Amino acid sequence: MASTSRLCLILFGPPGSGKGTQAKLLSKALGVAHISTGDMLRAHLAAGDEIGREVRSIMESGGLVSDQLVNRMVEQRIEQPDCRNGFILDGFPRTVSQAKLLKDLLAAQGITPWVVHLDVDYNVIIARIAGRRQCPSCGTLYSVTSNAPTVSEVCDYDGSKLVVREDDREEVVRERMKGYERQTAPVLDYLKQTGYRVWEVDGADGSPQAIARRIEDLIRSQGFRPEPAGAVKK
Ligand code: AP5
C-alpha cells in the first residue's frame, strides 16, 4: 500500500499525452506540488543562465539532457516546503537511471509512489502538439482546437501573448517521439518491476477535466487525504 500521508504521483506518457495539463489540474485538486522537469529546464533557458546555456541545443533538437543534471534538480526540488503534502512528477523519470535515483530518494523518505500511464494514440499526439500554445508568464496550457483562449493567442489569466514551444516544430517532435520509444518507454517496465502500482489511463477519452477527475478518484480510493484542497471542478 502506498503512503497515504505524502503523495508521489508519477505522470508517465509520451510528449503531448497531457502530463502537464493533468499535473496542473491535479496539483490544485490534491493540494500537492507540481514538479515539471521540462518547465524547470525552460525557466533556465529563459533566464539564459549557465544551465540554460548547457541544455539549449539539446532541448532544441529534442534530445534528453543529462541524468546527472536532472537528478540533481529533482533531488533539491522535492525538499522544498511546498512538497510537504506530496508532489506530482511530470516528465521525470525518463531514463532507467533517473528511475533508480527516484526509487532511492523515495525509499529514504518512506514514500511509495503511484504511477499513471497516460496512453494516447500517436496521431492524436501529433495533432495536439501542433495546436499547443502556452502562456510564457503563468504557464497555462491551451489548445487551438480543444481548449482555445477566449481571445485568440492571448492568455485568459494575464493577457500575455501565447507562444509556441521551440521544440514543438514537426521535425523536433519526431525526434522527441523516437527518444521516448528508445529511452523512456522501457522505464515503465522498470517501475512495474519495482513493485509500484501502475494505472493505465486513456489520455484521450474526454476533456482534461474529466480525465483529471478519474485520476483523482483513483488516488482518493487508495486513502490519500490531502490537507485542505479543492476537488477538481465537477
Ligand atoms: P517536457 O516539457 O517534459 O515535454 P514532454 O514530455 O515532451 O511533454 P510535453 O510537455 O510535450 O507534453 P505533455 O504530456 O505535458 O502534454 P500537455 O499537457 O502539454 O520536456 C521537454 C524537454 O525537456 C525534453 O525534450 C528534454 O529535452 C528535456 N527534459 C525534460 N525532462 C527531462 C528529463 N527528466 N530528463 C532529460 N531531459 C528532460 O498537452 C499537449 C496538448 O494537448 C496541449 O495543447 C493540451 O491543451 C492538449 N490536451 C491535453 N489533454 C487533452 C485532452 N484530454 N483533450 C484534448 N486536448 C488535450
Image: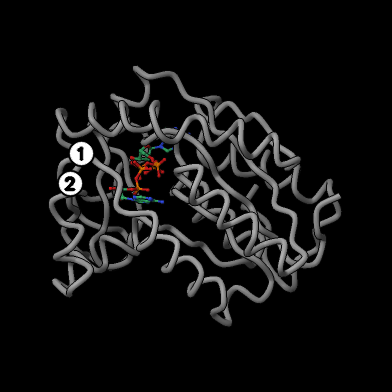
User: Which sits in the foreground, 205 or 166?
Assistant: 166
| Ligand 1, image quadrant it occupies | top left
Identify whether 32 is placed above or below 95: below
In the rendered structure, the answer to whether residue 179 lies left or right of residue 72 reads left
Residue 3 position within the rendered picture, expressed as x and y whole percent measured from the top left: 81, 59
Mark 2 is surrounded, within 10 Å at the Cα level, by few (under 14), some (14 to 19) or many (20 or more) other residues, namely some
Name which residue lies at 62% across and 52% down.
233
Does label 2 point to a residue whose CB lies under 8 Å from ligand 1?
no
Does label 1 point to a residue whose CB lies under 8 Å from ligand 1?
yes
Residue 50 position within the rendered picture, expressed as x and y whole percent measured from the top left: 18, 73
Please identify the quarter of the rendering in which residue 218 is found: top right
Name which residue lies at 83% across and 46% down.
221
In the rendered structure, the answer to whether residue 217 lies left or right of residue 128 reads right
Name which residue lies at 25% across and 42% down.
63
Name which residue lies at 16% across and 41% down.
61
Identify whether 169 is placed above or below 10: above
Identify whether 208 is placed above or below 225: above
Identify whether 44 is placed above or below 180: below
Tell me, yes or no, whether the two marked residues, 2 and 1, touch with CB atoms within 8 Å.
yes
Residue 69 position within the rendered picture, expressed as x and y whole percent measured from the top left: 35, 63
In the rendered structure, the answer to whether residue 7 lies left or right of residue 72 reads right
Residue where numbered disc 1 is placed? 168
Residue 38 position within the rendered picture, expressed as x and y whole percent measured from the top left: 34, 54
Please identify the quarter of the rendering in which residue 7 is found: bottom right
Which mark is nearer the camera, 2 or 1? 1
Local secondary structure at mark 2: loop
Local secondary structure at mark 1: helix
Amino acid marked by disc 1: Asp
> What is the distance, in whole Å, between disc 2 and disc 1 at their CAs?
7 Å
Residue where numbered disc 2 is placed? 164
Amino acid marked by disc 2: Val
